[in-house]
Amino acid sequence: MTLRIGLIGLGAIGRTVAEAIQEGHAGDSLVAAVLVRDRAKHQQDASSLPCPVTSNPAYFFKEEMSLVVEAAGHEAVRRYAVDTLISGRDLLTLSVGAFADESLLAKVKEAAAASGRQILVPSGAIGGLDAVAAAAVGGLDEVTITTRKPPRAWRGTVAEGLVDLEGLKEPVCLYEGPARQAALLYPQNVNVQAALSLAGIGMDRTRSRIFADPTVSHNTHEIVARGSFGEIRISIGNVPSAGSAKTGRLTAMSVIKAIRNRTAPLVIGL
């Protein structure tokens, strides 16, 4: 049966996902409707999609769909996550950093449990979430993630008040501490850290280090996890998305794969 998808957000990631679905790269699926903040800004994109594109949530949720994909930021999670779940749809969300707000996470999980639906978190710009989650079953002692991105990726963030991004000649540490605070400080840049935290030992125990680094051209993430199972070390260099220096290309690919898995006869990497 064809998977009908509601898409929230039509930015760099949303457009890539919508195109992949149209081109048949996301399994037996179709986009049933798209919800955007301001439809006037997406007139050209809307004309290329064979589905309604609206800024009216009520109209969006009237469409028949079984999965809602969120690719629009933390505010979209706060506004629509609970409504998605209680309306009987699963939620696949990229803006996992929104769950640094413990009360929001509790409400969303409660809505999922009450409606018998699921909150799905794709791997995004990193790998190894499956391995870290598996290791957590046996007990993890520590998890650390170090994120390095070129200075341009930190424009429009609090980093602009900390360092001269344009004049940077060497790496500068923008933050070091619990992943929860990292997610709150840099909501567009480190959703992967929140996802890793939820897979492993939580946002308060997961250690985060964030760098603006003029010596790298890729968005890089280095993960180290240790526990009774042994040790995991993962390093990823992600090419920035054409539409946003803050987001790696792998992020959209992970969403496409997650959608494809919903109808695939064989699924690898659970």
Image (spheres, grey):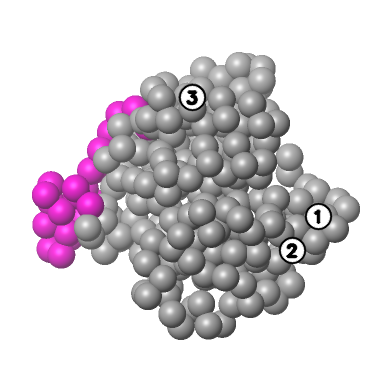
For image coordinates 78% across by 47% down, the residue present is: 268
What type is the residue that disc 2 sits on? Ser
Q: Earlier in the sequence, mark 2 or mark 3?
A: 2
Q: Secondary structure at mark 2?
A: strand
For the residues carrying marks 1 and 3, which lies nearer the camera in this image? 3
The outermost residue toward the right is 265
Q: CA distance from mark 1 to mark 3?
A: 29 Å
Measured as percent of width and height from the top left, residue 21 is found at 67, 69
Q: In the rendered image, is residue 76 in sight? A: yes
Image quarter in which the N terminus is found? bottom right
Q: Secondary structure at mark 3?
A: helix
**222 with respect to 153 (left or right):** right
Q: CA distance from mark 2 to mark 1?
A: 8 Å
Numbered range of the magenta stretch: 157-179
Give the label on residue 263, or none.
1
Q: Is residue 176 magenta?
A: yes
Q: Which residue is nearer to you in this view: 17 or 270?
A: 17
Residue beneath disc 3: 106
For image coordinates 61% across by 55% down, the residue present is: 62
Asked if residue 37 is positioned above or below residue 132 in the image, the reply reads: below
Q: Which residue is nearer to you in this view: 91 or 199?
A: 91
Measured as percent of width and height from the top left, residue 143 is found at 48, 28
Residue beneath disc 2: 29
Q: Which residue is nearer to you in this view: 253 or 65?
A: 65
Q: Which residue is nearer to you in this view: 70 or 152?
A: 70
Q: Is residue 39 magenta?
A: no
